[in-house]
Image (cartoon, grey):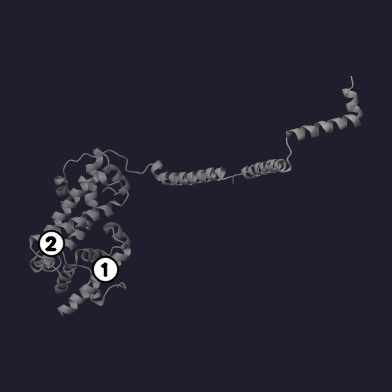
Amino acid sequence: MKVYDEATIVEQLHHQATAREAFSRVIEHYSSQLYWHIRRLVIDHDDADDVLQNTFIKAWTNIDNFRGDAQLMTWLYKIATNESITFINKKKARLQASLDDEGAEALVADLETDKWFDGDDLQVRLLHAIASLPDKQRVVFTMRYYEEMKYEQMSEILGTSVGALKASYHHAVKKIEAFFQDDD
Amino acid sequence: MKPEESQILAKLGREPGFKVPQGYFEDLTARVMDRLPEVEITDVDATPTLWMRVRPYVYLAAMFAGVWCMMTIFNRYNGTADGSLQRMAAVAADVTEASNADDFLLMTGFDDYDIIAYDDSTYDEALATDEDLTNTTTP
C-alpha cells in the first residue's frame, strides 16, 4: 500500500494527468473520517452515503479552487459540514416541519427500526436531545463530543471564533442536560 | 471527563451506536470515482515556490524602505537633514546683516555720493602719508 503524502497528493491534484488518480487516494484516505462526521449529523446511513458522495463530487469539481492554503482535511470537512446542514434543512422542509423543533426530531424518529443502528435507549435519547439543538450547536456539539475535535481546528472548519464555539458547546450541553432532566 | 462536560454526558459514552453495511468502505472509492465528472484542471504548481515563500518578507522590507525614503525627503525639504540647517542659518545671518546695513544707510541719510567721497578722501589721505603709494603714482 502506498504511503499517503499530502504535499505530493496536493501537487498531483493540480495537474490534469495525475489529478484523478490523486483524488482516488484522497477518497481512500478521508472517506471513513468524513462518513462518520456526516453520519453523526444526518443520522441515517443512506442519507450519510448520499451526502458523502456529494461532498467528494463537490470537492472534485472545485479542486481548482483548492490552493493548499489550508489542509485538505479542513477543506473537505468544511464541504461535508455544509452539505450535511443543507441536506438536513432540505429534509426538514420536505417533512414540512419548522426549523428547530419537531422537524429536527424527525431525523431520529426511525432510529429504533433502523437496521444500521444498534444503540441502546440512552444513546437514542441522546440523539433525540442533539437533534433538538439549533443547527450550529448541533454541529459544534457533534464535533466536540463525538469526534473530540480541538476548538482551534473546529474554528478553521466552521469559520467561527474559538470563544464562540466554546459558548455554543456550553449552551448545547446545558440544553442536553435540561432535555434529560425533563425526560426523567 | 473534561471540566466543561456534565455528569449526564460522562455516563453516556461517545459511541452513538451506528453501524455500516459489511464492506461499505471497501467499494466506496470505486463508487465515488464512477460518479466523478470530467473536469478541466489548470496545471499549476501547488507547491509554494521560493518567491511565494519570501514574497511577504520582500513586501515588508519594501514598505520600510519606502517609509525611510519618505522621511528622508521630508526632512530634506524641512531643513533638518545633515548640513542643511547650518547652511540655512548662515544665509539667514547674511541676510540679517545686509538688512541691517540697508537700515543704517536709510536712517543716517547716507547715499552713494557719501560713500564715494569717503573712499576718495581716504585714498587722498593714504597717498599723502604712504611713501610707497606716492612713489607708485608719481611718474
Identify the residue at horizontal 12%, vertical 67% (top origin): A108
Q: Closer to the observer: label 2 or label 1?
A: 1
Query: Circle 1 — which element?
Result: helix
Amino acid at dot 2 = Asp
Q: Nearer the viewer, residue B51 or B38?
A: B51
Q: Position of residue A104 (x, y in %)?
A: 13, 66
What residue occupies the far top of the structure in this picture? B139
Identify the residue at horizontal 54%, vertical 44% (top origin): B72
The answer, for residue A78, to whether it is visible in the render is yes
* Subunit of label 1: A
Location of residue B110 with respect to A32 vertically, above or below: above
Amino acid at dot 1 = Tyr
Query: Circle 2 — which element?
Result: loop
> Is A25 on the left-hand or right-hand side of B66?
left
Q: Residue A44 — which label?
A: 2
* Subunit of label 2: A
The residue under label 1 is A169
Distance between the alpha carbons at the discs numbered 2 and 1: 23 Å
Location of residue B26 with respect to B114 vertically, above or below: below
